[in-house]
Amino acid sequence: MSSAAPVDRRPVLLIAIGAMLAAALGMALGSGFRLATRLREDIAAVQAASALQAYPDELVREVSGLRERLEVRAYTGRALTTLRDSTRAFSDRLQALAAIDHDPATLAPVRRRWHVYRETLAPVLAFHGEPYVDSDTAATRLSSDGHRLYANLERARLLALANTHRFGGELAAVTQGLQSSASTAAARLRLLLLAGVLAALVLAAIAAWLLLSRARHERAAQEARERTRDILRTVREGFFLLDAEHRIGSVWSDALTRMFGREDFAGLGFRELLAGLVPAPTIATALKYVDLLWGDRANENLMKTINPLSQVEARSVDPQSHEPRYLQFDFHRVTGLHGVKYVLCSVVDVTSNVALARELQESQNGANAQLDMLIGMTRTDPLQLASFLDTADAGLQLVNAILKEPARSDAEFRRKLGGLMRELHTLKGEASALELGGVAERLHALESRVSGCESRATLTGDDFLPIVAKLDELVAYLRGIREIAARLELTGDPAPASPGDSIAPILQAAAARLAAEHRKALRIECAGFDAIPPAFAKALKDCLVQLVRNAAVHGIEDPELRRTRSKSDVGLVSARFARTPDGYELTVEDDGAGIAPDTVKAAAVRSGLITEAEAAAMDTRAAIALIFRAGFSTMSDVSLGAGRGVGMDVVARTIRALGGRIGVATAPGKYTRFRIHLPPGGAAATAVA
């Protein structure tokens, strides 16, 4: 049977004594500071009171001197100014002394006497007239103003002579009282400083005794730590202890240095350890998880299933390495007599395990991608698929040519990015219309790479390398589609009689897909596509796909909103192509929400295309024309269907390249109509209407 060891209360007692002495020392120092402040103020007050003692005699001299100058008809301006300055100076110093002095009663007699002085001097100080009158028959004599000034000076002089001695005595009494107060404060300050020195000596003696008594315990603890370090040097896992404030203890295994590339772990916060290695949201979740482990009711085995750091991707500590690294954290509670004392954290590098699992997953994903490719191909008309593959090959060859164009300046790099974005956006629109989801997603990812480059402050040739890598993946994917189509012998039916006959099914499929994605009811009507000339077919197909997408995403409202506007639940988009006397005309109209000029201007300002001042000066026609500007979009988020601000820019450029022009008519809440005029042949390009 074992008994509990007696508790050593000496450290607690010594700490209490030290705290009391420290409190006494603090009180002494605080009181000393207040006394020193009071002493400084008393000294300043004594100096101010001493300076005031000379003013009563000085006022008598100045008043008498001014009176004598009037008697001899001398110039009085300078003497009057001097009297005013002396009076103002006395008032200012008396006010300053009142602000310093802590006992207003000591200054009360002086302030009352000075009030009488000031009232008597007020008519003299306020004098601004001419005291003398000159005449040809008599000598210079006092004017009426001069007589009044002389009388006022005489009253002031008599008052000053009668009260100078008393005034000086009162000021001397004030000075003496302030000196006495300063002497008392100085004596108290000396006593407090002496007490503070004695308290400091006592504290120093206690501290020395504590250091000597703890030295023995430190030696024993050091030996224990050395044995622990020997153990921690040999393990391959990283171990460390976390306290309640998420700080690492003074003991850890050497494996942490290899994993995290640092050696200063003692006292390091868990947040700082993970900073730069894992995302900030993951760090925040991990800290909350560690906090839960400190709860008495927490089930440790159950909590292991929600460990946010069970497997995390971490940045490599080697700056030359670009390979991802994966760490696995595990947490265990260390308990004592009074509950949880620490949380033991173990860290294992599981990069090789993750790499093996990823290889297996990539193999599975590859099989799934081929299956998705086959399903998409079976849903697509063989002739449309073959046409798209030919279009995609030509488009990607153009993209490759743009990438190879030499460029040195930032402007040249950005022109390349603009060309890439337009070509990729066109291909993505047709792939989406044909429901080739795998192709559309890869084109969208490639667009994101281009958009990321556009957002950079400066561009270099190295910024295009990720785009080239993604382009190679897309080319390989399209090559796989073509090979599978050839093996399955997807040749399709005979070609349509007109190049325009294949456009309507593409638009119908695109409208159905977009309506389902955006939870809208939508139908499309096509007319006159058989009259589209072969030279215009490819370009108009791309434009129609973009215009139908815009109508489905931006134009047609939700069924609930359409009902509130007395419209049919099913939105209508009509596309008509017809021959005109001077060429051709393509009209695309929807019965949707229309285009609000204020909304367009606000989106353009938000995108940085125009300033607020430019927006305010725009008329309706200029505001609507903003939809054709590169980078314009009313959507805040980028999705597979919209948000890049490229579609209408591509449409406008395509129509101009055909030598045509495009116009817009709209009524907010009712309709939007795009009318495209095309020349009978390759006429010169015209401006966008």
Image: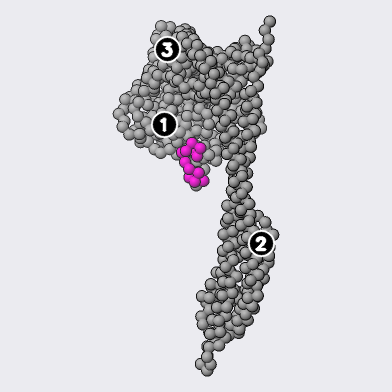
Q: Earlier in the sequence, mark 3 or mark 2?
A: 2
Q: Report x, y in % for residue 227.
A: 50, 11
The verdict on residue 424 being magenta is no
Q: Report x, y in % for residue 368.
A: 49, 9
Its colouring scheme is one colour
In the picture of the structure, the residue carrying the numbered disc 1 is 456
Residue 355 in sight in this render:
yes
On screen, residue 455 above or below 142: above
- Residue occupying image coordinates x 51% and y 82%: 74
In the picture of the structure, the residue carrying the numbered disc 2 is 107
Residue 542 lies in quadrant: top left
Q: Which residues are magenta?
A: 604-616
Give the class, few, some or many, for how many residues have Cα within 10 Å of label 1's Cα (few <14, many ≥20). Answer: few
Tell which tag, 3 or 2, sits nearer the viewer: 2
Q: Residue furthest bottom?
A: 137
Mark 3–mark 2 CB contact (< 8 Å): no
Q: Nearer the viewer, residue 474 or 581?
A: 474
Residue 629 lies in quadrant: top left
Q: Nearer the viewer, residue 299 or 658?
A: 299
- Residue occupying image coordinates x 57% and y 80%: 67
Amino acid at circle 1: Arg
In the picture of the structure, the residue carrying the numbered disc 3 is 481
Q: What is the quadrant of the C terminus in the image?
A: top left
The verdict on residue 609 being magenta is yes
* Residue 171 left/right relative to 643: right
Measure the alpha-carbon separation of dots 3 and 2: 104 Å
